[in-house]
Amino acid sequence: MAKKILGISAFYHDSAAALVVNGEMVFGVQEERLTRKKQDSSFPLNSVKACLEQGGRYAGNGKPFTFNDLDAIVFYEKPLLKFERLLETHYAFAPNGVSQFLSAIPVWVKEKLFLKKIIREALCQVGDFDQTRVKLLFPEHHLSHAASAFYPSPFKEAAILTVDGVGEWATGVIAHGQGNNIKILREQHFPHSIGLLYSAFTYYTGFKVNSGEYKLMGLAPYGNPASDRVRKMKELIHSNLVDVKDDGSIYLNQEYFDYAAGLRMVKDDKWAQLFGIPRRGEETEVTQEYCDMALAIQDVTEEIILKLAREAKRLTGARKLCMAGGVALNCVANGKIMRENVFEDVWIQPAAGDAGGALGAALAAHYIYFGAPRQADEKTDKMRGAYMGPEYSELDTEVMAKKYDAVFEKLPDEALYGKVAAHLAGGAVVGWHQGREEWGPRALGNRSILGDARNPEMQKKLNLKIKYRESFRPFAPSVLVEDAGDYFEKGYASPYMLLIDYVTKARRKALPADYHALPLKNRLYHLRSDIQAVTHLDYSARVQTVHADTNPKYHRLISAFKKLTGYGLVVNTSFNVRGEPIVCTPEDSYKCFMSTEMDYLVVGNLVFDKKLQSTAGSDIWRQRYALD
């Protein structure tokens, strides 16, 4: 009989639930998408309920599951081991950090220390739960990450690399996956952490830890790689902050950090003295010094990740690599592994952060605890494009439209793609809501905002009028997989937007010799290529390849755009505004559409034209949205 296992991650910043049936992920969603609270860390009651209600349908049962249909419920880490680390760390750093310790203990007692009891009580709010039959399991944090990377991959054997801030004690793991088994070979332990090192620079450059790391990565190309400042900053990082060994293990000098015993990431005064610049305040101007700092730490991080990848290759002898953990979302470092040909192929879990731990926990239970056999298909992974979340019917959209007096046009498929492609080619911005929501932090064509990559004004329009975010932030291309090599140097498949590639030299525009000396605002929109809106300052792009077998509707739309313009790619950014989660329901999409300067919204085959909406763009509607 097929095992049915529910995986859960919670209480940090990425709560989620995932349902696995017979080793296959059939449903998964992050709690923030349902509560509309960005980075919701609470116990994922809504996600659990959605897994039960919708998971049965996708598993072929045609009806919801109950808890008593499950074989196990699995939490993604061991809370008691994590509590041990908290106690030992504060003991080691005492008397420093007393205030942090006193503030943390009540939270642990209330939410984490008695987690079995808390989980059972929470689940009982959803439905009946036979606690004597359904097993409650707790794999280690990095085993959950490793399982999320290896088991859905197309590889029968692979090295596994997981890197993040911290789990219980481990901050990084090298493992070996073979068949249904994962063997941990090497661990890096707290407080020495690549993820925390990168987060420290995220903090110092003025961004929010645990959510701003991708901003730091996006800022790095604005640094000047030929400058003495970048060279000097890298030297200072190596000589004062981190000792990097040949095998990729690191030692962080705790004299400069405050995360282990204090309430901040770093000791601001010591960093200001070391680097000669103060910590940047949030929302203040991003000057060249901080761009150079971002480039310096990005280069150091790539150096460490490359060494870890080579060590993983040495320890395992494997030809393939699987990756997970928050640092695996650093697509520039991932791209470096590919370009250096350390491994023949690399597969990265789409939800590489802690949300993916919910999936990994369930898979670890299936293959390791229950000992189920595993069959890998070398041609495809088991994530099926990562379209694993909630789906809503046309009736749901029509009911929403009636609620808001919204005007729409319903089009058949043959008319839909051509019309939307024409809107994009004409410079319009389109909200594109289709089918099941994506699993993970990337919008992959089902909850996306789309534009024309050729349009030199598109990046500016999207950042300032749609996303309401920092102007330096880059955008990703969605390109037909069969056309990827026409636009990007390597042209490799990258369905989950987790690899960097570079625009081909034939498409690049020459930049002035004094380019890096220009003020930042003058460099932002300088013409760089014929696909300007998706070309970063260093000609890089965070590529998503679109595959007809996993997302036929998105593939048909881009194909229609290619037929019209000759270009088989579009701009793709997540369907949300700054500070909010990606949209989930048709109502979420309509609210976002109406509160921005988006031109069209397409939900399924229903097309909403902003000009025809009775309260389009009005202050009244925006207030209604804010208060709803």
Image (cartoon, helix red, strand yellow):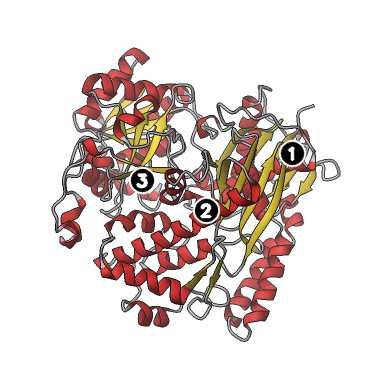
Q: Which residue is mark 2?
A: 326
Asked which quadrant contains residue 154, the reply is: top right
The dot on residue 367 is 1
The kind of residue tagged 3 is: Tyr
- Whole-Å distance between the Cαs marked 1 and 2? 23 Å
- Near-viewer residue (603 or 308): 308
Give the class, few, some or many, for how many residues have Cα within 10 Å of label 3's Cα (few <14, many ≥20): some
- Left or right: where does residue 599 sit relative to residue 326? left
Asked which quadrant contains residue 18, the reply is: top right
Which residue lies most toward the bottom here? 95
The dot on residue 625 is 3
Q: How many marks?
A: 3
Q: Residue at x 40, y 50 (%)?
A: 332
Kind of element beneath mark 1: helix
- Left or right: where does residue 549 sit relative to residue 9? left
Q: Residue at x 58, y 80 (%)?
A: 97
Mark 1 or mark 3: which comes first in sequence? 1
Using the image, determine if residue 435 lies above or below residue 148: above
Which residue lies most toward the right here? 132
Is there any visible trace of residue 474 in the rendered image?
yes
Residue 479 location (% of width, % of height): 35, 31
The kind of residue tagged 2 is: Gly
Using the image, determine if residue 614 lies above or below residue 310: above
Kind of element beneath mark 2: helix
- Near-viewer residue (365 or 510): 510
Mark 1 or mark 2: which comes first in sequence? 2
- Near-viewer residue (267 or 415): 267
